[in-house]
Image: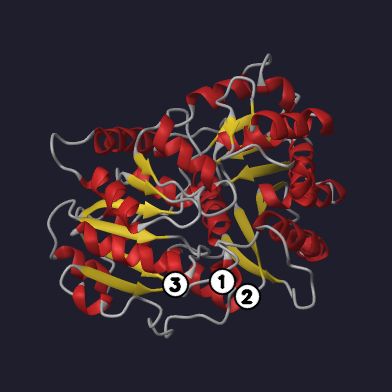
Amino acid sequence: MELHGALVASPGMGHFVPILELGKHLLNHHGFDRITVFLITDDVPRSKSLVGKTLTEAGPKFVIRFIPLDVSGQDMSGSLLTKLAEMMRMAIPDIRTAIMGLEPRPRVFVVDLLGTEALAVAEELEITRKHVLVTTSAWFLAFTVYMASLDKGTLFKHLSSIGALPIPGCSPVKFDKVQDPSKYIRELAESKRIGAEVITADGVFVNTWHSLEQMTIGSFMDPENLGRVMRGVPVYPVGPLVRRAEPGLTHEVLDWLDLQAKESVVYVSFGSGGALTAEQTNELAYGLELTGHRFIWVVRPPAEDDPSASMFDKTKNETETLEFLPDGFLNRTKDIGLVVRTWAPQEEILAHESIGAFVTHCGWNSVLESIVNGVPMVAWPLYSEQKMNAWMVSEELKIASRLNVADGIVKKEEIVEMVKRVMDQENENDMRKNAKELKKTAEEALNKTHIPSAYFIQN
């Protein structure tokens, strides 16, 4: 019988890329005859454009389909978590219809963490094996499932009294300040629902590897710690699920990098969804200028109220003027900097030997791409679990300096200090050494198969 897998990703490149890479891995290493990937999006043309820029292999055995959503007239207020969870909820009927139309009927179903409600569709259609792909860290999975295991009173006590959530066998999740849970009712409800649904799957794949999160993965395997919370559902680290740099790719940014000295350039990008306010954009511009280092900055128009605005803003594009940058900035920095509108080939940029540091929002994809290429970071989290990722890379892995975003606007002086701390070449700083050591472990993980070889052909 043909082994067919159906994979579903929630909106955003941070979810599309790992699910696509997992699909390739299943096809190439686990005996699958066919993989069909469904990408949920409210903007098919934009999604096709972004996926087309990152996808290098497709064919009759690897099929990509887009499931469009019309969110006009819908309540899309709230955090990114609540927006994406609501979009995936809206997509359930279309997911069911799309899977029912597949021939042969898939025997394996995978959905990312934000789409766990679709596990019920797989159950209803009697798909043999149903799984969750966690596109971010094992630590975030630990946070999600452990939070779901707590009663409301215990959870609220942790958040409101000590501003942290201790997790068995893991680092505690600390918040900038003591939280008022009543302000996050929707977010907590969605998170607890997701955590409860995860343990209804047959298995969980996580975009990480043992050497990166040894303690957390160990806790999942320990029946006295998170293994108890998972109730026997196995957790498999399958990362890093990142697209590798394409050899020979031509792009004006790469041509410019070819002219620069080794590890001399600061790369600045806040992902496909990140946005800064106008004031913060100005501070960043002045900060980059004052560092004196060469830089590439992927810049997007400012957004005042939503740091994830670029993910859903269809009105801004590569023809947008740069009038929001400080007067004279482009002229003053034309010999040391390159400002790029909207998009640049990030994987190829980070793989270039001229890159010395990455100023990043700490989306997990970006973090892994930086690690895979041995590039230390300046951590600048904007939303969602990015603050957890920023803490991990700066305090635990020690491959980044971390900006203080808790007090609002990050001033140019702090930007200069943190960039110089990473770019300092005197005595080969520890962050750069650590990043290069982690790169070796990533390369080892890329060459391993972490899912048991007979896993998908059982039953």
Q: Circle 3 sits on which residue?
A: 300
In the rendered view, tell whether residue 3 sits above or below residue 211.
below
Per the image, label 1 sits on a secondary structure element best described as helix
Percent across and percent down for residue 179 are: 68, 40
The type of residue carrying mark 2 is: Asp
Per the image, label 2 sits on a secondary structure element best described as loop
Q: Circle 1 sits on which residue?
A: 47
Badge 3 or badge 1: first in the primary sequence: 1
In the rendered view, tell whether residue 24 sits above or below residue 344.
above
> Which residue does the image show at 74% across and 59% down from the upper left?
88
Label 1 and label 2: CA atoms lie apart by 6 Å
Tell me the mark number nearer the camera, choosing from 3 and 1: 3
> Which residue does the image show at 74% across and 49% down from the upper left?
187
Circle 3 packing at 10 Å, graded few (<14), some (14-19), many (20+), is: many
Q: Are marks 1 and 2 in contact (CB under 8 Å)?
A: yes
Percent across and percent down for residue 145 are: 71, 34
Q: Circle 2 sits on which residue?
A: 43
Q: Residue furthest top?
A: 224
The type of residue carrying mark 1 is: Ser
Per the image, label 3 sits on a secondary structure element best described as loop
Name the quadrant containing residue 298. bottom left
| Apparent side of residue 129 relative to residue 432 in the rendered image (left or right) | right
Circle 1 packing at 10 Å, graded few (<14), some (14-19), many (20+), is: some
The type of residue carrying mark 3 is: Arg
In the rendered view, tell whether residue 410 sits above or below residue 223.
below
Name the quadrant containing residue 299. bottom left
Q: Relative to the observer, which residue lies in front, 371 or 174?
A: 174
| Apparent side of residue 164 relative to residue 415 in the rendered image (left or right) | right
Label 2 and label 3: CA atoms lie apart by 18 Å
| Apparent side of residue 413 relative to residue 221 in the rendered image (left or right) | left
Tell me the mark number nearer the camera, choosing from 2 and 3: 3
Percent across and percent down for residue 43 are: 63, 75
